[in-house]
Amino acid sequence: MFRLPLLVLVSLVIAFGGGVWSASVTLKATSGFGAISLGPWVAYPELQTEKADPFARAHRAGDGKILLGRAEGLVFSARTDQDGAALSGRCSYEISGITPPARFWTLRVSDAEGVPLSPPEHFPASLTSWNTLRDADGTFRISLSADAKSGNWIRLDTEEDVTFVLTLIDTPTAGSAGLVELDMPDIQQTGCRDA
């Protein structure tokens, strides 16, 4: 007697639950389509424009963050080093080279969810184009490690995987169709505590 209503209820629960779960996984898996990869660095130049796909719009709405418009800047993130190994807070890295032209840029470390890491007080959590020491040819070297280094250094000391976020502000490359030709800094692992 109650068999048919029970089967209908179970089917609805599975369909509704599966739909919510699959939508959640899809939105967390990507910021949308149209990613540009330059080595380990990835950016989504259309993320804040009217050309953004529905997944990117939903991701943006779910994050509740104000993103840069295409004319304002571009955010690159890296989850791997040059060799394709996942970035780990237990390892040390060196970021070297140059950035694309920009009026201002910042480099910070965040966790896998994109939340900036906050080191203990008096330790650098990020660097900017204004306070980064450069060589005579304009290149730079930034050390990311648990131990303090001379020169450019960001403290990196956590047990989880991390993401490096490079934000270019007021850059002509944000509106450029030739993004694939840009030179981005290299990310090299210099050692790990577990090894």
Image: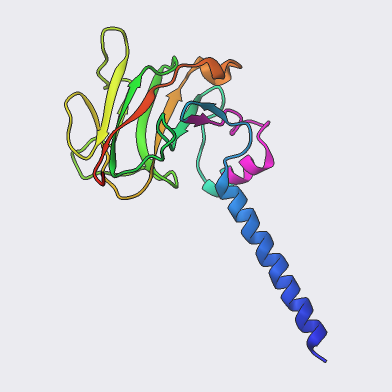
Q: Along the line of sight, which residue is nearer the eye, 166 or 149?
A: 149
**Residue stretch rendered in magenta on the structure:** 41-59
> Viewed as shown, does residue 86 lie left or right of 177?
left
How many numbered callouts? Answer: 0
> Viewed as shown, does residue 55 lie left or right of 120?
right
Residue 58 in magenta stretch = yes
Q: How is the image coloured?
A: rainbow
Q: Identify the residue shown where x is 52% and y is 35%.
A: 67
Counting from the top left corner in percent of width and height, residue 25 is at 59, 53
Q: Along the line of sight, which residue is nearer the eye, 86 or 145?
A: 86
In which quadrant will I find the C terminus?
top left
Counting from the top left corner in percent of width and height, residue 126 is at 30, 33
Counting from the top left corner in percent of width and height, residue 192 is at 27, 41
Counting from the top left corner in percent of width and height, residue 11 is at 75, 73
Q: Identify the residue shown where x is 55% and y is 19%.
A: 180
In which quadrant will I find the N terminus?
bottom right
Q: Identify the residue shown where x is 57% and y is 40%.
A: 31
Q: Residue furthest bottom?
A: 1
Quadrant of the rendered image containing residue 116: top left
Q: Is residue 170 above or below residue 9?
A: above
Q: Residue furthest front?
A: 195
Residue 42 in magenta stretch = yes
Q: Is residue 164 above or below residue 70?
A: below
Q: Is residue 129 above or below residue 125?
A: above
